[in-house]
Image (spheres, rainbow, N blue to C red):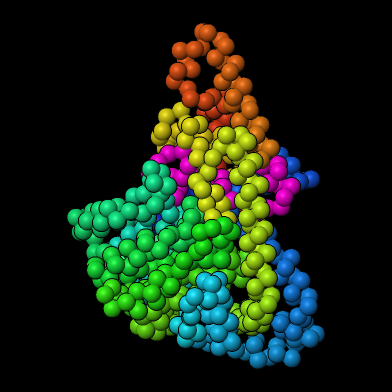
Amino acid sequence: MVFSSRNQTLLSKIAASDQHGENSPYFDGWKAYDQDPFHPTENPNGVIQMGLAENQLSPDLIQKWITKNPKSSICTKDGVDKFKDIANFQDYHGLYEFRKAIAKFMGKVRGNRVEFDPDRIVMGGGATGASESLMFCLADPGDGFLVPTPYYPAFDRDLRWRTGAQLVPIICNSSNDFQMTQEALESSYENAIKANIKVKGLIIANPSNPLGTTMDKETLKTLLRFINKKNIHLICDEIYAATVFNTPDFISISEILQEMEQDPTCWINPQLVHIIYSLSKDMGLPGFRVGILYSYNDGVVNSARKMSSFGLISAQTQYFLASILSDEAFVDDFLSENSRRLANRHKVFTQGLEQDGITCLPSNAGLFVWMDLRRLLKEPTFEEEMVLWKLIINDVKLNVSPGSSFHCVEAGWFRVCFANMDDQTVEIALERIHTFVRKGKKNEVGTLKNKKNILMQKNLRLSFSSRLFDEKALMSPMSPHSPFVQSPLVQAKT
Ligand SMILES: Cc1ncc(COP(=O)(O)O)c(C=O)c1O
């Protein structure tokens, strides 16, 4: 869709601004996929979507439960008696049964080491809506929130776009597997102060998107001490709390808070701590838009509840979830089977990559891997990262997301999602990567044999095909940078 500059002046500043973050390769990759989506029979040479952090490994378990529990839906013969009540009900406190079931579920996915109070559960339209509501409660336009890099690209949209808050990066790099250090934290804080930014908080995603790693106890303690000392907020996005498939176990900020609360020598003000949660990843229900804000601050709970009118979860969804989440035996089985399937898929995918000499950051969580392609860059620059990324989209036909879109400070890292497809599609994706790497190696050897080109080779770390340096090919109709009508789906996905 094309907006004229005249039209732009008719719009609000927010509507006309480009702060949504849609002009990034992260979203461009989806556009390329939307243009030419892979289908095993109808479009076998299409783009495989590996840029979408969705868990499609376990819907059969939920489907089976639904078949056995027809009363859980108000749209079945068995459940229709409840139709009138639920169709009429809508209140921003939510169904008590729903809040109770969610609170219990949140405790369960944290190993029942901590309890959650149903009265502190506030609803949002996915974690997306819940995070924005929280930001509206905490930040005035211009206020700054520190966030470790690399971070989930849509934080720019969810936390910043409409609220006017600013995100200040805490620089992390591969020298220590992208872990946040105290020095990096302090230095980001100091930089913000120097830039006259009022720092209001710190935001983390634990487990991390895009790294697929979990934070250890010591780091979480350091963060709590830091925010307590500075008297700023800590927002923990724990949307992948149960999407953990390997050791070490996930540790929630709520557990550390509870532990520190019991120790009078290191008391932390709980009013500064807020958790964002959702069922999009852990239950694989992103379409249900079930987002949760859990705050230890009464003021935040009260104002966020009023704001939740703008993004309520439908009463029908609340009713269904209250029913399924209260079935503890089912939830236990689901969580362990889902985690087993994720572990298996992660293993198949990473071992497949390893066969081609491609490594990923060691990970134990999430729906993606953080793939290291630094050695494939001609030079360690973001321009070269873009060249490689376009080649992967255009030639290899895989939509992976470049590290630059996650604000990574080192070029050559890519996030690759592995749980939003079936086994056959993973095999095809791995086969494509295999062909790509083999072709690259063949070219390298072939070129090395040609003495005339030896000098040129010194400058090329790996040359995959002549298309790599063919600008025309990069801007072919397949290119995500070609002008085309944008699919409305692009705005909806995360
Ligand atoms: C870290 C993180 N937070 C929030 C979201 C948004 O989730 P939801 O679909 O519940 O809005 C995502 C989705 O990818 C995510 O990875």
Whole-percent x and y of residue 268?
30, 74
**Residue at 74% from the left image edge and 75% from the top image edge:** 66
48 in relation to 269, above or below: above
> Where are the magenta residues, as a range?
400-429
- Residue 329: name its quadrant: bottom right
Whole-percent x and y of residue 284?
63, 65
Whole-percent x and y of residue 200?
29, 67
Please state if 41 lies on the left or on the right of 56 as rendered: right
> Can residue 134 be seen in this snapshot?
no
Of residues 479 and 159, which is closer to you in this image? 159
Whole-percent x and y of residue 401?
52, 46
Q: Tell how many labels.
A: 0
Q: Which quadrant: the C terminus? A: bottom right
| Residue 185 counted in the magenta span | no
Please state if 91 lies on the left or on the right of 383 as rendered: right
**Residue at 60% from the left image edge and 48% from the top image edge:** 50
293 in relation to 79, above or below: above
| Residue 415 counted in the magenta span | yes
Please state if 110 lies on the left or on the right of 228 as rendered: right
**Residue at 45% from the left image edge and 83% from the top image edge:** 120
Of residues 151 and 23, which is closer to you in this image? 151
11 in relation to 302, above or below: above
> Can residue 348 be seen in this snapshot?
yes
**Residue at 56% from the left image edge and 61% from the top image edge:** 244
Of residues 85 and 203, which is closer to you in this image? 203
